[in-house]
Image (spheres, coloured by chain):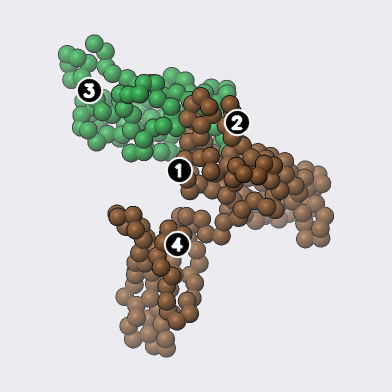
Amino acid sequence: MAIETTTVQGKVVMPDGTGATGGTIRATLSAPGSVSDGSIDNEIGGSFEGTIAGDGTITGLVLVPNDVITPATTYYIMEFIVTSPIRARWTVNRTIDTAPDPVDVGDLSAA
Amino acid sequence: MAIETTTVQGKVVCPDGNGATGGVIRFTLSQPGAADDGTYNDVVGGVYEATIGSDGTVSFALVPNDAITPADTYYKAEFRVTSPERAAWFEYWSMATGVDPIDIGDVTKLSNPTGVASPPTALSTGTLPTAAAAYRGQIRYVPGGAGVDDIGVQCLKTAADTYQWVQFNAGGES
């Protein structure tokens, strides 16, 4: 059995309603923890980056949900790094759950 | 279905009544939020710049704040006029879905958005208004008389989601 993951989908949208045209979303786990793969309890920590595609679509942002990580208090520090059409950067703290999967980026719960 | 937007139209005009002839209006959303595009619940954030035309004309679209979750977002609108005379000022805007397009002069301007400190206000008779969400974050003072400290207070939300004026100085002493 592999480690449980949840896919984050949707778009990054600029204030004018159009999609961002480039950038990344960097998700950093708030604290290291452990997660089971069904046979071994593994160490989990660090950061992972998804991509903001040319129409704002989020691609490749697949994360281990916080509700399968021990301790139960972890969350992701999510940095939205928009490089075009206008450089912008903001950070939010969000928790990822096992369901729903995939989950819309706008439906993520604030940590 | 695309993300809901509201179009802003009209002109940026100089004090002499003539249109500005160049510049931009830079919009920054107060905090990132979520908006539905009919398929996904997307995230909205960042900065947008609208161009001021050579006769002052502007025409641009913004995602209205009443289509964004959480409910209390607003835009900081920074006007950067480059010609005929350089000028800069900013406003806090609340965009709505109701009127589309909307004249730039009719956009709701906020005087004290949530989270933006307001200058201290002297109160007559030393009476504070009842603490409420509308005053959240505001700092006020109750002036002391001759030889008596002013009382400094700030409106803060409690864990019970009520509001109260919290005194931050000893105050009231002579």
The three-letter code of the residue at mark 3 reads: Val
Residue where numbered disc 4 is placed: B135
Q: Looking at the picture, how far across and down is residue A32, in whole percent?
A: 25, 30
Q: Which chain is green?
A: A
Residue where numbered disc 2 is placed: A18
The residues tagged by marks 4 and 3 sit, at their Cα atoms, a distance apart of: 45 Å
Query: Of discs 3 and 2, which sits in the foreground?
Result: 2
Task: Say left or right for B82 vs A105.
Answer: right
Query: Of discs 4 and 3, which sits in the foreground?
Result: 4
Q: Are marks 3 and 2 in contact (CB under 8 Å)?
A: no
Query: Of discs 4 and 2, which sits in the foreground?
Result: 4
Determine whether the residue tagged by mark 3 lies in a helix, strand or loop: strand
Q: Looking at the picture, how far across and down is residue B125, in whole percent?
A: 45, 81
- Residue at the location (20% across, 29% down)? A70
The quarter of the displayed image where residue A22 is located: top right
State the quadrant of the C terminus of chain A. Answer: top left
Determine whether the residue tagged by mark 4 lies in a helix, strand or loop: helix
Instruction: Please give the chain letter of the residue carrying mark 1.
Output: B
Query: Of discs 1 and 3, which sits in the foreground?
Result: 1
